[in-house]
Amino acid sequence: EETAGRFKQAGCLKCGDSVQSSAGKMLLVAFHKIHPRQQRKLVTLGTAQAELTVTHDHRIPCPGAIKAASELQQGDLVMCGDRSQSLAKVKHFDLVTEVVEIRFDPDDPVQTRLAPRWGIETMGAERHWTESSIGPLGPTFVEPRSEALLEPLSPRPSSAASV
């Protein structure tokens, strides 16, 4: 859910917080409860653009109706953003987990965003300096390397034609 332009985890919301509905209206968090870990019936719903796991009785807006997650089948339409998308995946399963129950006032739909458990690792740009253990400014000295010494990120095409 989004609060004042930021995304916030459902478990971190509290009564009195505001979130933005799918239609852009501000909604009040009127009720918030974290239910303890126990065996739950869950449903994972997946479209080409999104995936979400909810309790079997979670209400899902569909074009023309609101359905419980357990009623949905592959091929049914659900709302993703401002358009409907076909469910490519519907998986029912049991899991011991805690769940967060939230009620909004008014009772309007909100969009969810799942934060990935892991992200793809990346690195910054390659260093373009050398370090010396002793330099004129003290124990560590950093000197920019000459641009002529930098290697290009991709091979440059040869100017000579091969026969």
Image (cartoon, grey):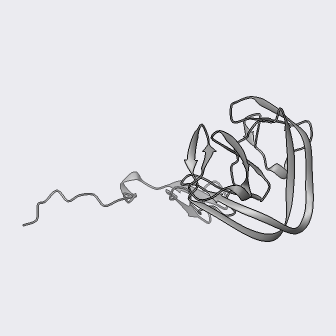
Q: Residue at x 40, y 57 (%)?
A: 150
Q: Quadrant of residue 90?
A: bottom right
Position of residue 163 relative to residue 138, above or below, is below
Residue 23 picture location, percent across and down:
68, 31
Q: Most extreme residue toward the left, as rendered? A: 163
Q: Most extreme residue toward the top, as rendered? A: 25
Q: Quadrant of residue 27?
A: top right
Residue 56 picture location, percent across and down:
77, 59
Classify the position of the C terminus by image quarter.
Answer: bottom left
Number of marks in picture: 0
Q: Residue at x 86, y 54 (%)?
A: 100
Q: Nearer the viewer, residue 89 or 159?
A: 89
Position of residue 9 relative to residue 99, above or below, is above
Position of residue 31 relative to residue 117, above or below, is above
Classify the position of the N terminus by image quarter.
Answer: top right
In the picture provided, is 153 more to the left or to the right than 128? Answer: left
Residue 33 picture location, percent across and down:
92, 51
Position of residue 76 relative to residue 17, above or below, is below
In the picture provided, is 9 more to the left or to the right than 51? Answer: right
Q: Residue at x 69, y 54 (%)?
A: 114
Residue 30 picture location, percent across and down:
91, 38
Q: Quadrant of residue 74?
A: bottom right
